Image (tube, rainbow, N blue to C red):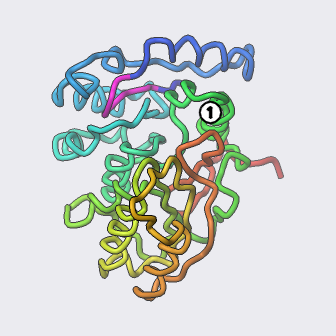
Amino acid sequence: MKIGVVAPGSPISPEIPKKLLTLTAGLYRDRRPDIWFHPQCFASSGHFAGDDFSRAAAFVDVANDEGVDAVWLGRGGYGSFRLIETVLPRLRAAAKTKIFLGYSDAGALLGALYGAGIGRVAHGPMPADLARRGGEAAVGRALAFLVGGDAAALEPTVARHMPTAAFNVTILAHLIGTPYLPDLTGHVLMLEEVSEPLYRIDRALGQITSVPAVRRVAGIMLGRCGDIPANDPEFGHTEDEVVRYWCERSGIAYLGRADIGHDNENKVVPFGRWQPQASEREPQ
């Protein structure tokens, strides 16, 4: 299997490929997947991994490469949304056969791909998670999904009979009002957040749950909200209470907690109804 890594947002540390090679050598030994980092991943243009043109070109090249089986988004940061308008029209038939995996800022591009019916999209760990302490577990989980479609890598509530989708709260809020918000009718919508004050989480959830299209979801699950800055004065409600409030007010079912977040326990959430391909099916 060949996996192409691109960075549509911020650059990847040059140390990540070496760490990933060490990890895969231990996990797969003689049957290691071929993981190739596009040189664009290490470019720098201010905040971004190269300018918009370079990042878009790298993504299109890898997505359209018939020899690549999966496109792994290297890290988040910010920048994916800037590419959507130019990337989508340039994707060819080969892109529709691939898995696209990432989370955080990458959710903007993933949501647009899912809405356009391009590829098999999933929210899950990225190579840059190796920079976290204990990140090997998260990245190993992502590889298990990419290489073998391992059901153990999935968020535990993912079921084949119910479509799912997962987003960072802020990213989903920013897709609203654009042509790139996918149809989430009947989906279990899983949301997570990091480094945002509770009042911003509350404001974004108010926006999300007010949208008629979002109110057609089967329900909302809340993942982890990490590194929440202190609020002055104290906000007075937990993230769980905030989501419950907006779900009740909007008539959306609140379905409990999801095992996703910006951490080493982040599980994989395929968009749509998860169904392993023939080569990934468990033995009967």
Residue 159 in the image: x percent, y percent?
Answer: 65, 65
Q: Which residue is at a point 63% across and 64% down the rendered structure image?
A: 160
Q: Is residue 222 above or below residue 225?
A: below
State whether the magenta stretch is mostly helix, strand or loop.
loop
SS state under label 1: helix
Q: Which residues are magenta?
A: 4-11
Q: How many numbered discs, if any?
A: 1
Dot 1 amino acid type: Leu
How crowded pointer 1 is (Cα within 10 Å; few <14, some 14-19, many 20+) is rated as many
Residue 206 in the image: x percent, y percent?
Answer: 34, 74
Rendered image quadrant of residue 33: top right
Q: Which residue is at a point 44% across and 88% down the rendered structure image?
A: 251
Residue 32 in the image: x percent, y percent?
Answer: 66, 19
- Residue 64 lies left or right of residue 17; in this view the side is left
45 vs 279, nearest the viewer: 45
Query: Which residue was labeled with disc 1?
Result: 143
Residue 150 in the image: x percent, y percent?
Answer: 70, 44
Q: Is residue 202 above or below residue 43?
A: below
- Residue 53 lies left or right of residue 156; in this view the side is left
Q: Which residue is at a point 62% across and 66% down the rendered structure image?
A: 257
Rendered image quadrant of residue 161: bottom right
